[in-house]
Image (cartoon, rainbow, N blue to C red):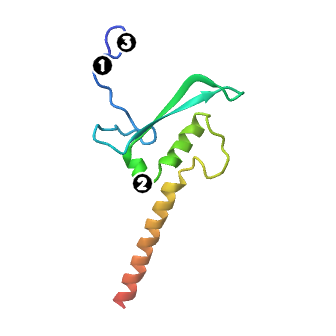
Amino acid sequence: MENDKGELVDLYVPRKCSATNRIIKAKDHGSVQISIAKVDENGRVTGENQVYALCGFVRAMGEGDDSLNRLAQRDGLLKNFSGWVGRGLGWARKLNKAHLVEEKLAAFSTHMLR
């Protein structure tokens, strides 16, 4: 909620996951908040930082590192050092494995019905 001056006056503003945009609940004990310091061209800390919050759901799926790499690359903190970074292939691999399991089950059930 905002007052007439446009300032936030809520007592509690919940955090949101930077990767999924989900609200991080108070009981989400798997969530983390990571601050990455910004540096100048000489590698010295400028005093500014970029904050990322990751919910327990992303971390439980094993996608925390991929999500953090994708977010840091989007914000210019990480170079695109590989074609794999930032494409979300971890999620695609899991979906591909699920698809392969479905194909094997379908082939098995077809074989059993003969």
Which residue is found at the position 47% from the left and 51% from the top?
63
**Residue positioned most to the top:** 5
Q: Is residue 106 above or below residue 114?
A: above
- Give me the disc on residue 61: 2
Which residue is found at the position 42% from the left and 54% from the top?
61
Query: Label 2 is placed on what type of residue?
Result: Met
- Give me the disc on residue 6: 3
- The Cα atoms of the two marked residues, 3 and 1, are separated by 9 Å
Query: Label 1 is placed on what type of residue?
Result: Met
Q: Is residue 109 above or below residue 20?
A: below
Indicate left or right for 1 with 70 as reference.
left
**Residue positioned most to the bottom:** 114
Disc 1 marks which residue? 1
Q: Earlier in the sequence, mark 3 or mark 1?
A: 1
Indicate left or right for 42 with 76 as reference.
right
Among the 4 quarters of the image, the one containing residue 103: bottom left
Of helix, strand and loop, which one carries label 1? Answer: loop
Structural crowding at the residue carrying mark 1, measured as other residues with C-alpha within 10 Å and reported as few (<14), some (14–19) or many (≥20)? few
Of helix, strand and loop, which one carries label 3? Answer: loop
Relative image position of residue 93 (x, y in whole percent) = 51, 61
